[in-house]
Amino acid sequence: METFGGEEVAKTNLESKKRMRIVLILFFLLIIVLIGRIFYWQVVRGSDMREEAYAQQTKNRKISPKRGVIYDRNGEVLAESITVESISITPKNIKAENKEKTAKGLAEILDLDYETVLTKAKKNTADETIAKKLDKSVTDKVRTWIKEEKITGVNIYEDTKRYYPNGKLLSNVLGFCGTDNQGLEGIETQYESVLKGVPGQLIVGTDAIGNELPLNDEKYIPPEDGLSLVLTIDEMVQYITEKYLDQAVSDNNPDYAECTIMDPKTGDILAMAVAPTFDSNNPFTHTVDSVKEKWSTMTSTERTKELQNLWRNKVITDTFEPGSVFKTITAGIALEEGLVKDVDTVNFVCNGYLKIEGWDMKCWRYYNPHGRQSLRQGLMNSCNPVFMNIALTIGKEKYYNYLSALGVSKKTGIDLPGEVNGIIHQVANVTDSTIASAAFGQGFTLTQLNMLNIISVFGNDGLLMKPRIVSKILDRDGNVVQENESVAEKQVFSKETANAVLDMMTSVVSNGTGRNGQVKGYYVAGKTSTAEQGRGANKTYTASFVALAPASDPKVAIMLTIANPKGKLGHQGGAICAPVVSNILSEVLEYMEVKKDYTSEDKTKKVEVPDVTNRTVGEAIRMLNNAGLKYNVDVSDMNAIVSAQMPVAGEKLVEKSMVKLYVEGNDTRFNTVIPDVKNLDIVSATKKLNDANLNIKISGSGMSVLQDPPAGTSVEQGTLVRVEFRAVGIDVE
């Protein structure tokens, strides 16, 4: 028994030792795990843990930078950032029994939803945003309430807000910003990286329950304000444009209207407007009464669609068939290719239509054909067959090469978001009817900006420019850090061709379909258009008028387009667009201090030719200048004696007419052939005779119907040609 008992004890002791070893092993393993965890948290995650602890002990408040200012070309502010205030709460600092009171007070003062504010107040967080970008008048009410009611946990801090001093002016170009100061449309989004700046920070120390510690625990990192932009836009030109564009919308009830003004020699955009438009300060408030009336019944998707349509800069985002304004391009191609050598020579016949590929392609005045036409008359009357014949004769390869050179199917590359390219047929797919339609601006589409830029070549000696709207970028001290120079794209037409087309466009306005586009004191070059969109019951019209002024040396190019007009004035470009452009140009040219081509008296003022024979050349010149006449003399000796003059003394000439002088010993008479000036307006007839060193005697008004001596007669230089003008029916297309 003893032995047995001893064995049992020994066995028990052995098992105890085994258990002890297991316990010790587990203990050591636990120690190793603990050491590993300590190593992980202190070494591996140490940096992260310190940051998290710091975050729990601090509040990090973002300080918004001021976006850069947007100026017009004269330094007028178009967009700026102003100081406002925002409100947040620290729920941890609001006692449980005061949370409902705090939420109710904020909701009432700030006109917010009570339940939404209460939900934020009941959170266990360090900071909750309540309202952003508030005027100080509003936040002062909150301050008074905090003081009177002894409210805790409500924070008011400085912030910035985008502000547009002119409200709706230029809205479709400028765009707008969101509540976070990020650009959402227009230039604001195009130049976001330039304008936005770099945010600052305010780091405030807090105690264990989130209360802010004294100011000496603050760390302030100031924001870096954004860079500024200088636009090519002229604020006053933009204002004038929008004033008359709004009136055009009111008078014609269109889907929309758009107007762009640019400098044809630089490509600078002086004005760009769409109507109806919106207020950049309140972009989510619709401005059209018919839409506002049904706003409450619309879905969110429908509202978004309506707003996006209002925001869209249709000058660069929407395309249309340009119609008859494109006839100027076809005329330019005819001259450049030598198909037409004299714009006043009768080369064409309008029978009301042209049969192409088995069907009749009509002139708009098919019911009363224009008959025999020169190129000038074809453009003045906007006669389709004239331009169809030109394009068909030129051939599709050459014709479409010009369209490509002009960039018809391309974007202009202007520094604005959303620009689209035009759409034209591939040359391989072009038929006779396709090219005939293209000749008068149908069968392809492009944006208004592209069309205006193309037309501008005739005001810039045939040179195509790249449009620009931002000229400079300024640093925070106003220094220029980047300048966007004007860019010449391509010499498309010769100077001679460009000037010839400009001269014909002047006739369009003087006595053609663009007569309503005349501007007192200036000769205007222009072209009307009335393009059909769709067919049958779905047919609509796009009316346009494009102009270059003054025609003598264009300072501005302008295009007005009215989409689907539904007013009492009709749908023809000459009737509804030309008068609006006339009004705009009248004010713009005066504002820009562009020298007038004539006064109201100049056109009709007659002066008597003085007798300058037997006087020195110098004396004769002074007498002619004083009389308001020009002179032509073949000698440089001012002391030479004038032996003869043409016209003779006593004749009545239009002011600024030319008198030919002959001197003793050098009185060889030179003859010239009288050109044909019939069917021309006064401006064109006068210029044509003056170019032949002849003078004009005017009777009547309208188009020239008779001339004496007749065309082809050889006469002495300076001879007075009598031309009779009569009023004719004006094509309105």
Image (cartoon, helix red, strand yellow):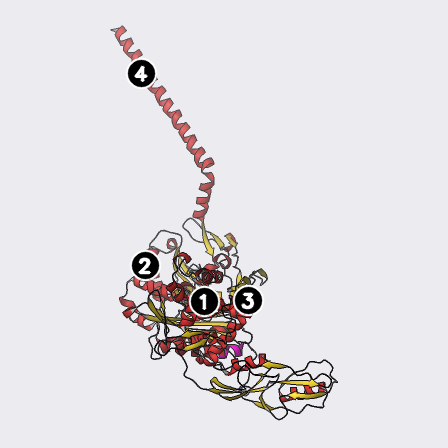
Which residue lies most toward the left here?
1
Q: Position of residue 583 (x, y in %)?
A: 46, 79
Tell me where the magenta segment starts and ends, as one range: 586-591
- Residue wearing tag 3: 494
Residue 500 higher or lower than 49, as above or below: below
Q: Position of residue 512 (x, y in %)?
A: 44, 79
Estimate the spatial distance between the alpha carbons at disc 1 and disc 2, rounded to whole Å: 52 Å
Residue contact at pointers 1 and 2, CB within 8 angstroms: no
Is residue 578 in sight in this rendering? yes
- Residue at left offset 44%, top offset 65%: 393
From the image, state whether disc 1 or disc 4 is nearer to you.
1
Residue contact at pointers 1 and 4, CB within 8 angstroms: no
- Residue wearing tag 1: 451
**Image side of residue 566 versus residue 67, left or right:** left
Residue 116, labelled with which disc?
Answer: 2
Residue 589 is a magenta residue = yes
Estimate the spatial distance between the alpha carbons at disc 4 and disc 2, rounded to whole Å: 68 Å
Residue 525 is a magenta residue = no
Residue 692 higher or lower than 204, as above or below: below
- Residue wearing tag 4: 15
Q: Position of residue 577 (x, y in %)?
A: 41, 76
User: Crowding at label 1, few (<14), some or many (≥20) Cα neighbours within 10 Å?
Assistant: many
